[in-house]
Amino acid sequence: MFGWNQTESKLPELTIDEAEAPNGKVTSSNGQVAATNGQEPPSREVAVKPPEWQQPVFRQVDRPDCAETFADSITGILFDGQTLRIEFSVSRMDEAKPGAPLTGRRTPACRLVIPPSAALDLVQKMQQVGAALAKAGYAPRLGTSPANSNKAI
């Protein structure tokens, strides 16, 4: 069910044909005559990418009032083929009673739902974070026991 490898599909380019008028001059689809200046007429096709195929450029805008959510565990991850859903939770301890075992509850704090493209970006960035934590000694290296990684962040 988890399909992290997305294949890129090549979309055909949209072309606009230019027509040659009876007088030998090349006209575009909007009827304008292309100047040839005694040279070979321009190409009969012009490649145009529709706006929905172009990649937009985004700039990051800060929003200081954006709420931050604390979570100390991830209690659920589900990829349903369309979205990745991650449930973050917080642990809350019950009142301690002498002679009784310690008990607590885990309460959902936030549910994140993202499309596959953002999920792939998240995986890539988390791999970078994991490598940085391992390099700093906070996380176990691949092939080692997690029991030795009790360093607090």
Image (spheres, rainbow, N blue to C red):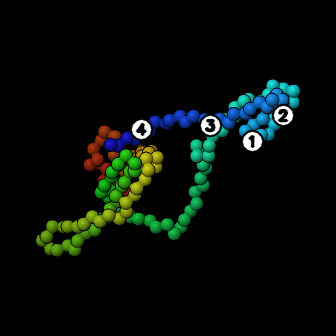
Seen in the image, is 84 located left or right of residue 147? right
Residue 115 image point, x, y percent: 44, 50
What element does badge 2 sit on? loop
Q: Is residue 31 visible?
A: yes
Amino acid type for the residue under numbered disc 4? Asn
The residue sitting at 40% across, 56% down in the picture is 113
What element does badge 3 sit on? strand
Give neighbour class at mark 1: few <14, some 14-19, many 20+ (Cα, 10 Å).
Answer: few
Circles 4, 2 touching at the beta carbon (< 8 Å):
no
Disc on the earlier residue, 4 or 2? 4
The residue sitting at 35% across, 43% down in the picture is 2
**Picture quarter containing residue 96?**
bottom left
| Distance in Å between CA atoms under marks 1 and 4 | 43 Å
Residue extending furthest toward the front:
22
The residue under label 4 is 5
| Distance in Å between CA atoms under marks 1 and 2 | 15 Å
Circles 1, 4 touching at the beta carbon (< 8 Å):
no
Disc on the earlier residue, 1 or 2? 1
Residue 128 image point, x, y percent: 45, 46
Amino acid type for the residue under numbered disc 2? Ala
Task: Indicate which disc residue 30 carries.
Answer: 1
| Distance in Å between CA atoms under marks 2 and 3 | 24 Å
User: What is the quadrant of the N terminus in the image?
Assistant: top left
Disc on the earlier residue, 1 or 4? 4
Amino acid type for the residue under numbered disc 3? Leu
